[in-house]
Amino acid sequence: MAKYTGPDCRLCRREGCKLYLKGDKCNSDKCPLLKKYAPPGDHGKGRKKNSGYSVQLREKQKTKRFYGVTEKQFKMYYDKASEMRGVTGENMLVLIERRLDNVVYRMGLGASRAMARQIVNHGHITVNGKSVNIPSYIVKTGDIIAVKENKKDAELWNTVKETKNLSIVKWLSFDNTTLTGTVVALPERADIDLDIKEHLIVELYSK
């Protein structure tokens, strides 16, 4: 699937919920979803009866867009999750949650997952002291994620350094003075605060 290059807010309108693709703008009065709730397009305002397939498809698309992954990547996570012990849908979400770009976002180093992905792509991040510029890198318990030493004085991190009591997920620890975080445990389904009905995605792929 080709990379989407259109307006991010259009995707939120299409899914009918905030995907938090634009950082602080999503929590402000400037969020277009507050003014244009209907899906984009000439037929967006029309009333449609959603089929079972449509509901499942929309849930899959919404989840993909939450995390900013491609169709190929998303299917790969589902296939891996289906081979693991436990509940397939929960395993899939946990795998995606462990992506390096998502971890960087969860630590507060990026205002959005797209920004966090760019930070990783541009070589600002190390894992266990080694430079990693692959956003899809899957972290493990005990991994130490940090901003490169020669990048720590960049203006990009000023707000993060000044923020006290930075709220992050419980499976990560983060020191905003050194810009260093640790994966203290693997995430569980209860740790994922996104409105996702993963069983619908499993039903879609199971057909």
Image: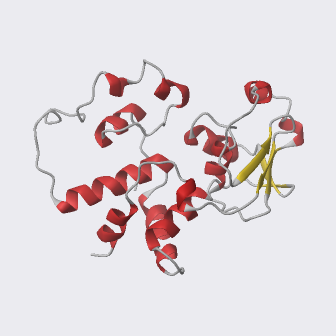
Q: Where is residue 36, by image quadrant?
A: top left
Left or right: 176, with 172 as reference point: right
The residue lying toward the viewer, choosing from 172 and 110, is 172
Identified at 49% across, 26% down, the residue is 27
Which x, y percent locates residue 28?
47, 21
State the scheme by which the image is colored: secondary structure
Identified at 63% across, 53% down, the residue is 135
Q: Quadrant of the N terminus?
A: bottom left
Q: Measured along the vertical axis of the image, is residue 51 above or below residue 202? A: above
Identified at 49% across, 54% down, the residue is 69
Direction top: furthest residue:
29
Left or right: 20, with 12 as reference point: right
Visible residue check, residue 115: yes
Visible residue check, residue 7: no
Which x, y percent locates residue 160?
74, 30
The residue lying toward the viewer, choosing from 46 and 195, is 195
Identified at 43% across, 18% down, the residue is 29
Which x, y percent locates residue 21?
48, 37
